[in-house]
Image: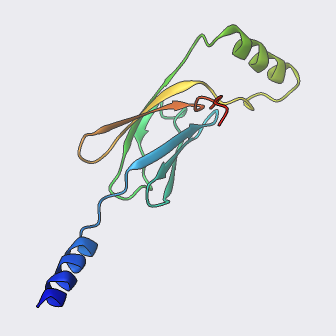
């Protein structure tokens, strides 16, 4: 009897599969890449869409909104200007806050590029 209960309990847990949740968001000059907890990768042309829209190729669907930091710190401005002067325009991804909204209306907020981990582990 205990074995039967254990099998039923484990079987019930296996049947409860949660919807994938956003794990990471990355920007290029024109593309937003979303990585989900199940390994799915979704892409959207955020710049063409005006900074907000929906992922068309992402299961149940996720909405997104990108807010670019217009005046990043002076070092980033200098670095971006240098790369553009050297002919590598668009090589430095924009700094932005990305809000991903799932099917339940829950917002997942990411900063891109992600902050550097400067700890000495």
Q: Quadrant of residue 89?
A: top right
Q: Colour scheme used in the picture?
A: rainbow
* Residue depicted at 37% across the width and 59% down the height: 59
Q: Nearer the viewer, residue 29 or 3?
A: 3
Q: Position of residue 16 (x, y in %)?
A: 24, 68
* Residue depicted at 60% across the width and 31% down the height: 113
Q: Is residue 34 left or right of residue 76?
A: left
48 w.r.t. 72: above or below: below
77 w.r.t. 39: above or below: above
Q: Residue furthest left?
A: 1
For the C terminus, the quadrant is top right
Q: Quadrant of residue 79?
A: top right
Q: Is residue 9 left or right of residue 102?
A: left
Give the total number of marks visible in the rendering: 0
Q: Residue furthest right?
A: 86
Q: Is residue 71 left or right of residue 88?
A: left
Q: Position of residue 31 (x, y in %)?
A: 58, 40
Q: Is residue 47 left or right of residue 9?
A: right
* Residue depicted at 44% across the width and 61% down the height: 38
Q: Position of residue 81 (x, y in %)?
A: 78, 16
Q: Position of residue 94 (x, y in %)?
A: 62, 26
Q: Nearer the viewer, residue 76 or 103?
A: 76
* Residue depicted at 83% across the width and 18% down the height: 82
For the N terminus, the quadrant is bottom left
Q: Nearer the viewer, residue 75 or 64?
A: 75
């Amino acid at each position: 009897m205990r074995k039967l209960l254990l099998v039923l309990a484990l079987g019930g847990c296996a049947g409860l599969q949660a919807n994938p949740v956003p794990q990471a968001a990355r920007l290029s000059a024109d593309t937003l890449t979303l990585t989900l907890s199940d390994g799915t990768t979704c892409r959207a042309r955020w710049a063409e869409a005006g900074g907000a829209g929906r992922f068309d190729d992402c299961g149940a669907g996720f909405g997104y909104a990108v807010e670019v930091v217009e005046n990043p710190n002076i070092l980033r401005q200098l670095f971006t200007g240098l790369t553009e002067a050297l002919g590598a325009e668009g090589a430095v991804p924009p700094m932005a806050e990305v809000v991903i909204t799932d099917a339940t209306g829950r917002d997942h907020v990411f900063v891109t590029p992600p902050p550097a981990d400067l700890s000495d582990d």
